[in-house]
């Protein structure tokens, strides 16, 4: 990733009547990256995409592309292309004519158009489908045509508006891999909009988590997942357990937190001071579970009873009622060396976690 | 027989009976009359003949046919040109204004179109409203003679049939998904390109429906040419009306009716084939 942003959004604000869809948003998009705008519906992520595409005009701020402001430039004169949520393939045109549309608008030579359409079709693996009409294609094939129709124009930035949401689970996973492959192959900047955090995490170079027209956190999938900066990001991305606690002592870079009378040592990234009430966040897979029958609980740990055991194949999910009353969610990977460790409903267990795996907010 | 199927038979049967009694039977009588001979004393005499059809394909009637076709085509073309932008704008404006404009368009239907045609006479006649206005503004020095010309008939037909073009176009444009236009813009199309490559082809079913609903009545309406064109303009509708009401030649009028019906059936068949073709790629579009 080069450090020159290709698109910059500066204090961009967009209102629909009285509703603020995008609120003084700043965002740099870098050459060649796969950036995902992730957020719940109505968070303004699609509006950001439509502002970049030029379908909406912004109320305040500016969008700069290649150093030049885009304000007022119509969509047909922007060097970006969009893959629409429900593809918006032209129903009266064949696959070939759909893909060739952008090139025809540029009035390229016929033979050149044929060559480039063929290239795009081979990238999305749809050769031989040229003469089909969109309604004769499956959902996955329509998706590929929509991709081909956009990338054939060799845009600097490809905007993808929830392109996988209409596909079923298996096809979606297949297309995620395809999208990554196409992204690598073309080296075009991808701006991808989704509400599906799994999709975002598995594909993106960077994720911008959006809420109410603002970016809550932007960073690599690992950082977003492992180090959420606020409760919104923590709750929106993945499952997470939240413990209420109070800082008791502060050391250099770490602290002790009192949770249900147990004193846990935690990393103190945000420089909390003693006495502050905090939330300690733990992913289900970061918690370690030990059966009381295997070893006596050693403090600090939280005792509880298994409510439910959900077998998932490579993992087993446990729903645990803590003695303090909370219900938490724990994921355990099978340990090949301890095949006799079987969790059952009603068993007494205790949970703890390795120092530093928690997030304190 | 269950209660449900009895209701179904009634629901299907009664309109069928209605159509049989008031449409099929009268039409069969017309077809029968077209093969009979004229009787100066009565209405028809029961002698089978093809004479009426021979008379129909005479140069005089063919000229009437040609005039009618030209006028109907012209009416269709002009209503299409007027209605398309109107319908397009209707789908783009604020819903309240849109509703108001649609009501304005529907209100004239509450008055008989015959009466509205008389109103046009008042507008167009030598000392009518239009001429009085134009003379007073000094735009013209002599009154325009519009009434009793083909122009008057043309204006009358366009005026009367315009809503029948607007409504199907409006429906078809309303259904048009804006995303197709956005996608085209996104791919570099100018407004003109978007119109000719996307909007026009996708609203073809509406254009065909509207054209049919204007063209067919334009061929058959007789009172508008009668009132606005005077005796000078003779169209198929007037020709048929005259055979029945003026000359009393029912068999000839019947034969002309049959020919006109055949012409319309052919057009309707064409209409269905072409809409189906236009619709064939449309299934996903309206999803």
Image (cartoon, rainbow, N blue to C red):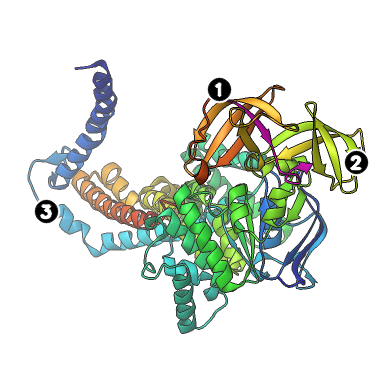
Residue A75, percent across and down?
66, 65
Residue identified by numbered label 1: A346
Q: CA distance from mark 1 to mark 3?
A: 99 Å
Chain ID at mark 2: A
Q: Secondary structure at mark 1?
A: loop
* Figure quadrant of residue A280: top right
Q: Secondary structure at mark 2?
A: strand
Residue at image x 37%, y 67%?
A129
Residue at image x 22%, y 40%?
B27
* Residue sitting farthest toward the left: B47
Chain ID at mark 3: B
For disc 2, the neighbor class at 10 Å (few under 14, some 14 to 19, many from 20) is: some
Q: Nearer the viewer, mark 1 or mark 3?
A: 1
Q: CA distance from mark 3 to mark 2?
A: 113 Å
Mark 1 and mark 3 residues within 8 Å of each other at the beta carbon = no
Residue at image x 65%, y 25%?
A304
Q: Secondary structure at mark 3?
A: loop
Question: Image check: A253 left or right of B44?
Answer: right
Residue identified by numbered label 3: B50
Residue B69, percent across and down?
36, 60
- Boundaries of the magenta span: A347-361
Where's the C terminus of chain A, which quadrant? Answer: top right
Residue identified by numbered label 2: A250
Residue A77, percent across and down?
67, 70
- Given residues B112 and A237, the one toward you in this image is A237
């Amino acid at each position: 990733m080069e450090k020159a942003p290709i698109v910059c959004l500066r204090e961009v604000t967009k209102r629909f009547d009285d509703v603020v869809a995008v609120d003084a948003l700043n965002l740099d998009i870098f050459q060649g990256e796969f950036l995902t705008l992730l957020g719940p519906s109505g968070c303004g992520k699609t509006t950001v995409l439509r502002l970049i595409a030029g379908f909406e005009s912004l109320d305040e701020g500016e969008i700069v592309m290649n150093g030049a402001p885009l304000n007022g430039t119509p969509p047909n004169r922007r060097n970006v292309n969009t893959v629409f949520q429900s593809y918006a393939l032209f129903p009266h045109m064949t696959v070939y004519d759909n893909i060739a549309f952008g090139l025809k608008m540029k009035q390229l030579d016929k033979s050149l158009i044929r060559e480039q359409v063929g290239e795009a079709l081979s990238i999305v693996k749809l050769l031989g489908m040229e003469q089909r009409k969109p309604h004769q294609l499956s959902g996955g094939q329509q998706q590929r045509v929509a991709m081909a129709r956009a990338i054939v124009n060799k845009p600097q930035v490809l905007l993808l508006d929830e392109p996988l949401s209409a596909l079923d689970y298996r096809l979606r996973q297949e297309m995620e891999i395809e999208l990554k492959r196409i992204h690598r192959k073309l080296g075009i900047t991808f701006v991808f909009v989704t509400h599906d955090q799994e999709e975002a995490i598995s594909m993106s170079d960077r994720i911008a988590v959006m809420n109410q027209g603002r970016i809550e956190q932007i960073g690599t999938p690992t950082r977003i997942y492992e180090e959420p900066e606020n409760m919104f990001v923590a709750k929106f991305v993945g499952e997470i357990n939240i413990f209420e606690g109070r800082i008791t002592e502060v050391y250099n870079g770490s602290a002790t937190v009192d949770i249900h009378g147990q004193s846990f040592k935690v990393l103190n990234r945000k420089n909390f001071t003693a006495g502050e009430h905090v939330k300690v966040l733990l992913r289900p897979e970061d918690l370690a579970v030990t059966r009381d029958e295997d070893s006596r609980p050693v403090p600090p740990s939280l005792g509880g009873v298994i409510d439910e055991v959900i077998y998932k194949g490579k993992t087993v999910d446990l729903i645990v009622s803590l003695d303090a009353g909370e219900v938490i969610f724990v994921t355990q990977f099978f340990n090949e060396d301890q095949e006799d460790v079987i969790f059952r409903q009603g068993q007494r267990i205790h949970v703890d976690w390795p120092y530093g795996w928690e997030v304190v907010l | 027989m269950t209660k449900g199927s009895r209701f179904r038979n009634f629901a299907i049967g009664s309109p069928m009976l209605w159509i049989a009694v008031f449409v099929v039977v009268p039409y069969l009588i017309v077809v029968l009359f077209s093969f009979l001979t004229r009787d100066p004393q009565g209405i028809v005499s029961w002698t089978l003949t093809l004479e009426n059809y021979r008379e129909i394909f005479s140069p005089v009637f063919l000229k009437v046919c040609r005039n009618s076709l030209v006028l109907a085509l012209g009416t269709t073309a002009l209503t299409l040109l007027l209605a398309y932008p109107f319908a397009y704008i209707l789908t783009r404006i604020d819903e309240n204004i849109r509703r108001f404009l649609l009501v304005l368009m529907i209100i004239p239907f509450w008055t008989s179109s015959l009466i509205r045609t008389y109103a046009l006479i008042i507008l167009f006649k030598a000392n009518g409203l239009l001429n009085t206005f134009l003379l007073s503004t000094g735009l013209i020095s002599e009154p325009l003679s519009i009434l009793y010309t083909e122009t008057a008939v043309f204006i009358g037909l366009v005026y009367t049939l315009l809503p029948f073009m607007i409504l199907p176009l409006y429906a078809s444009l309303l259904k048009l998904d804006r995303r197709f236009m956005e996608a085209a813009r996104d791919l570099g199309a100018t407004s003109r390109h978007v119109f000719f490559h996307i909007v026009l082809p996708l609203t073809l079913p509406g254009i065909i429906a509207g054209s049919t609903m204007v063209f067919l009545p334009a061929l058959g309406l007789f009172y508008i040419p009668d009132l606005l064109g005077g005796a000078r303009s003779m169209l198929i509708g007037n020709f048929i009306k005259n055979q029945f009401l003026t000359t009393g030649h029912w068999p000839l009028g019947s034969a002309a009716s049959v020919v006109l019906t055949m012409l319309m059936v052919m057009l309707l068949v064409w209409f269905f084939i072409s809409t189906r073709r236009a619709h064939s790629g449309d299934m996903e579009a309206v999803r």
